[in-house]
Image (cartoon, rainbow, N blue to C red):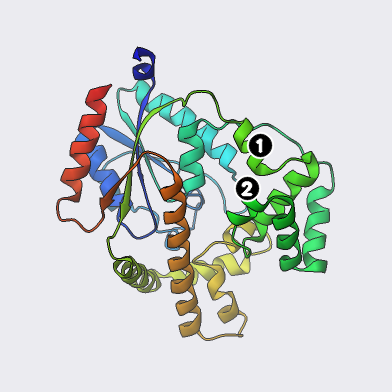
Amino acid sequence: MAESNEKPAVLAVAGPTATGKTALGVELALRLGGEIISADSMQIYRGLDIGTAKVTPAEMRGVPHHGLDILPPEAAFSVADFTAMAGRLTEEIASRGRLPILVGGTGLYIQSFLYGVRFAEEKAPDGLRRQLADELAARGPAALYAELQAADPEAAAAIHPNNHLRVLRALEHYRATGRRLSEQKAASLPPERPYRALVLGLDFPAREQLYRRIDARVDRMLEQGLLEEARMVYDRRASCRTAAQAIGYKEFFPYFAGEDSLAHCTEQLKQASRRYAKRQLTWFRHMDGVVWLDAGAPDLAAQALRLAEAFLQKG
């Protein structure tokens, strides 16, 4: 139908951590006249650079990047905030005759934006968030996660039990509205998606290859000063609640507290990163239309460019 071709074209480079999304996104932007919108839930924060594997100025190669370093670590930022920001940026980039390219591993952000999920403004009753935080302290995280599993099994399945912030948010939504997050999501999908999108997914044929890259990346991060960054988060953990829950920082808290060795905490981070990569892969494999590429292929950039050019020509 002709009307579908009138939708803005959006390219996305997605997949698990340590697959080379940043480099491929930059290469495609250079070849296609694109600008990059970061789709990473932690790279929006200033000062959290090493632990989030934030793109460096040298790696940008002159390509404009949006959605980086826009908030202090104390600020909250939701998927609704992201979809609003990405929608505004996509419009601005397209108006300049440039191609918007989403790059990142936060599947919820990419899917919600490309599917056009509408987020209703639902204000929780006063005191509910504080009440839930008090319950977390009194009853423990396992009890609240079990409550979420009973109330909204689908939401619970998508949230790690240790991600207390997201568990509390899901419970807050359920208690405030009486509706499951999954029900809200189904009701919030538009009849037609707002963008014409090509999603390129990066992965390795052998899982061990991905895990080796993750382990090597953690070692590099430590050489680059990850420990100092994690110490900053630890010292400000009461106010930087989102960062304090993030992989790359919380694993070192026992070391700073004198309760564990640096070597063991480093191994815990590698393990947590591998598990996170598995969850990312599961998420993206459930998204329809993702075109998967071998992240280790010598002609990866050429393959991706051919696919992107064919996609753009269809418009």
Which numbered dot is residue 130?
none
Q: Amino acid at mark 1?
A: Gln
Nearer mark to the viewer, of 1 and 2? 1
114 sits left or right of 164 in the view: left
Q: In terms of sequence position, does the residue under pointer 1 or pointer 2 come before the other?
A: 2
Q: Nearer the viewer, residue 150 or 202?
A: 150
Q: Nearer the viewer, residue 211 or 155?
A: 155
**Whether residue 240 is visible:** no
The C terminus lies in quadrant: top left
**Whether residue 230 is visible:** yes
Which secondary structure, mark 1?
A: helix
Location of mark 1 (residue) = 184
Residue 1: x %, y % from top left = 35, 15
Residue 96: x %, y % from top left = 33, 23
Q: Nearer the viewer, residue 119 or 82?
A: 119
Which numbered dot is residue 76?
2
246 sits left or right of 201 in the view: right
